[in-house]
């Protein structure tokens, strides 16, 4: 083996060791960013729900509502598509902005459901999410092939939601909620495994790996929020 090849092999092994050592810290960053986003969303949601004027501004004006909803979609698409081109700081700022917008749009739950049922469902969601995240991170079974299945099921779910907007069928709404729970339970495990694999394949433990962690936190955050909302539709008690 030539000296240059030998040096390259040694450097690759050192990078691998550095990444293995940094892996637990990177995983903590994934869940740390996700937890921060959930806190921001929760606080924003509660603050908006406590302000009749803000609630009216969002839900009394369709233009404002749809601009915020489309902005949310745009942020997810932008960050997901350009995570390798934008800086870690920029990505983090967009994640925070998304968390605020999502919190504002979720403020309605405090007017529809009791605080007790919201907190109860939150803890149910947290327990379910944690269990599936552990499964996805620790299982030896390759979940990659399930990604396509979950994606197709999600498309079907979205179509059913649109159809039921016109039908307003209570039974169909409950079926949609139950299917939604199953889909996002599965996606949580799938995303957790994908994040682990992506971090282990990162070239180093620097900014590129931290961007992977940030994008992973965004994906898990979306899984958690959707799981929470579907469970709330099933178990939430109305605030009459």
Image (cartoon, grey):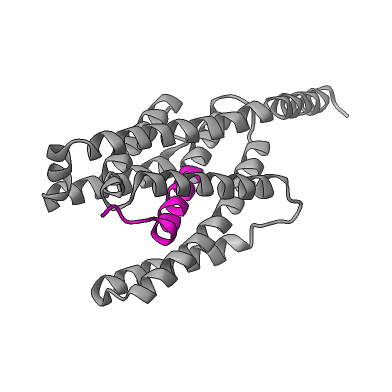
From this view, report whether residue 63 is shown above or below residue 155.
above
| 96 to the left or right of 34 | left
Give percent across and percent down for residue 73: 32, 49
Q: Report the span colored magenta.
A: 220-240
* Residue pictured at 28% horizontal, 44% vertical: 107
Residue 174 in which image quadrant: bottom left
| 109 to the left or right of 39 | left
Tell me if residue 191 can be seen: no
Q: In front here: 2 or 80? A: 80
* Residue pictured at 58% horizontal, 31% vertical: 209
Q: Is residue 223 highlighted in magenta?
A: yes
Give percent across and percent down for residue 217: 50, 38
What main secondary structure does the magenta stretch of the protein show? helix
Q: In front here: 122 or 197? A: 122
From this view, report whether residue 182 is shown above or below residue 113.
below
* Residue pictured at 85% horizontal, 26% vertical: 2
Q: In front here: 25 or 236? A: 236
Q: In front here: 240 or 172? A: 240
* Residue pictured at 59% horizontal, 24% vertical: 206
Placement of the C terminus among the 4 image quadrants? bottom left
| 62 to the left or right of 34 | left
Residue pushed farthest front?
A: 240
Residue 25 in which image quadrant: top right
Q: Is residue 90 highlighted in magenta?
A: no
Tell me if residue 121 can be seen: yes
Give percent across and percent down for residue 97: 32, 34
Placement of the N terminus among the 4 image quadrants? top right
From this view, report whether residue 222 is shown above or below residue 168.
above
- How many numbered discs? 0
From this view, report whether residue 194 is shown above or below residue 153.
above
Give percent across and percent down for residue 124: 52, 49
């Amino acid at each position: 083996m030539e000296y240059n090849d030998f040096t390259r092999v040694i450097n690759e092994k050192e990078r691998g060791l550095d990444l293995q050592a940094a892996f637990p810290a990177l995983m903590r960053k994934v869940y740390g960013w996700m937890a921060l986003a959930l806190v921001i969303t929760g606080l924003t949601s509660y603050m908006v729900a406590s302000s009749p004027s803000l609630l009216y501004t969002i839900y009394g004006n369709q233009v404002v509502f749809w601009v915020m909803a489309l902005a949310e979609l745009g942020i997810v698409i932008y960050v997901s598509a350009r995570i390798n081109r934008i800086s870690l700081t920029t990505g983090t700022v967009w994640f925070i902005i998304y968390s605020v917008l999502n919190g504002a749009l979720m403020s309605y739950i405090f007017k529809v459901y009791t605080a007790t049922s919201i907190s109860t469902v939150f803890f149910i969601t947290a327990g379910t999410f944690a269990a599936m995240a552990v499964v996805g991170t620790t299982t030896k079974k390759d979940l990659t092939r399930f990604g396509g299945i979950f994606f197709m099921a999600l498309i079907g779910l979205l179509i059913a939601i649109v159809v039921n907007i016109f039908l307003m069928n209570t039974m169909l709404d409950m079926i949609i909620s139950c299917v939604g729970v199953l889909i996002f339970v599965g996606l949580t495990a799938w995303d957790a495994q994908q994040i682990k694999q992506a971090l282990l394949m990162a070239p180093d433990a620097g900014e590129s790996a931290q961007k992977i962690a940030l994008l992973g936190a965004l994906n898990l955050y979306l899984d958690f929020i959707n799981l929470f909302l579907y469970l709330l539709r099933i178990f939430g008690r109305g605030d009459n």
